Image: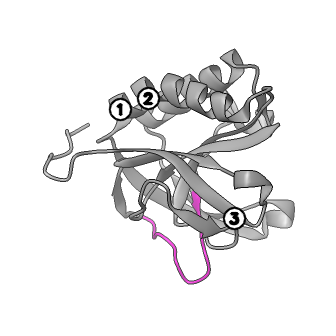
């Protein structure tokens, strides 16, 4: 079993980056799932292949940060909602479908498809603010336990806008 997550980072990251599980860069979760495959490296490659088209098509979408909210048990996790945006919703739905086509188990099915509420969790002193503009310019596949180590995360694949490219207006 391999626990994977597809996210849109809203701060700079590098392909292959390893970081402690308690120090996530700011991000929007797109879909989190377990891949049940005899060869977990193959599962990651297969999901990366399926995710590439939707990820590349969504790059450049402009998002707006919405209101503060509380997620988790008793609303104890501070987040900023992301205002509804068709490209982000379509990306989420395509990635859920891709994970499902590989037999992946979605860990929070109630929070997918029509129940998807994109947000950015506050991380220590880092957070976004209502009204901030964000460009969807870094989408990544992240291993939640590289080499079986649940204390760290590793970016397995990163799709980005070329730095010289002006994001399309959407």
Label 1: how many residues lie within 10 Å, few (<14), some (14-19) or many (20+)?
some
Residue 161: x %, y % from top left? 27, 45
Alpha carbon of mark 2 to alpha carbon of mark 3: how far?
Answer: 24 Å
Question: Where is the N terminus found, in terms of image quarters?
Answer: top right
The answer to whether residue 35 shows anywhere in this view is yes
Name the residue: 47% across, 69% down. Answer: 128
What is the quadrant of residue 45 in the picture?
A: top right
Q: What's the magenta bit mostly, secondary-structure-wise?
A: loop
Question: Where is the C terminus found, in terms of image quarters?
Answer: top left
Q: Is residue 124 magenta?
A: yes
Residue 52: x %, y % from top left? 44, 29
Residue furthest bottom in the image: 125
Q: Nearer the viewer, residue 125 or 82?
A: 125
- Residue 31, compared with residue 57, is above or below; it is below
What is the quadrant of residue 159 in the picture?
A: top left
The residue labelled by disc 3 is 152
Alpha carbon of mark 1 to alpha carbon of mark 2: how far?
Answer: 6 Å
Q: Residues in magenta?
A: 120-130
Check contact, mark 1 vs mark 2: CB within 8 A: yes
Name the residue: 52% across, 22% down. Answer: 50
Q: Nearer the viewer, mark 2 or mark 3?
A: 3
Mark number displayed over residue 52: 2
Left or right relative to 40: residue 80: left
Q: Is residue 103 magenta?
A: no
Check contact, mark 3 vs mark 1: CB within 8 A: no
The residue labelled by disc 1 is 56
Residue 87: x %, y % from top left? 41, 32
């Amino acid at each position: 079993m391999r626990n994977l997550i597809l996210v849109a980072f809203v701060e700079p990251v590098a392909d292959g980056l390893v970081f402690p599980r308690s120090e996530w860069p700011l991000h929007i979760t797109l879909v989190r799932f377990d891949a049940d495959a005899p060869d977990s490296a193959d599962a990651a490659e297969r999901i990366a292949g399926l995710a590439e088209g939707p990820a590349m098509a969504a790059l450049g979408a402009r998002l707006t940060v919405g209101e503060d909210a509380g997620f988790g048990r008793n609303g104890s996790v501070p987040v900023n909602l992301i205002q509804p945006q068709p490209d982000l919703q379509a990306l989420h739905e395509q990635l859920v479908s891709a994970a499902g086509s590989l037999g992946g188990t979605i860990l929070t099915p109630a929070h997918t498809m029509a129940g998807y509420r994109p947000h950015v969790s506050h991380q220590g002193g880092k957070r976004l603010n209502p009204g901030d503009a964000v460009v969807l310019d870094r989408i990544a596949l992240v291993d939640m336990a590289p080499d079986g180590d649940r204390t760290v995360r590793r970016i397995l694949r990163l799709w980005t806008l070329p730095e010289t490219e002006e994001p399309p207006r959407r």
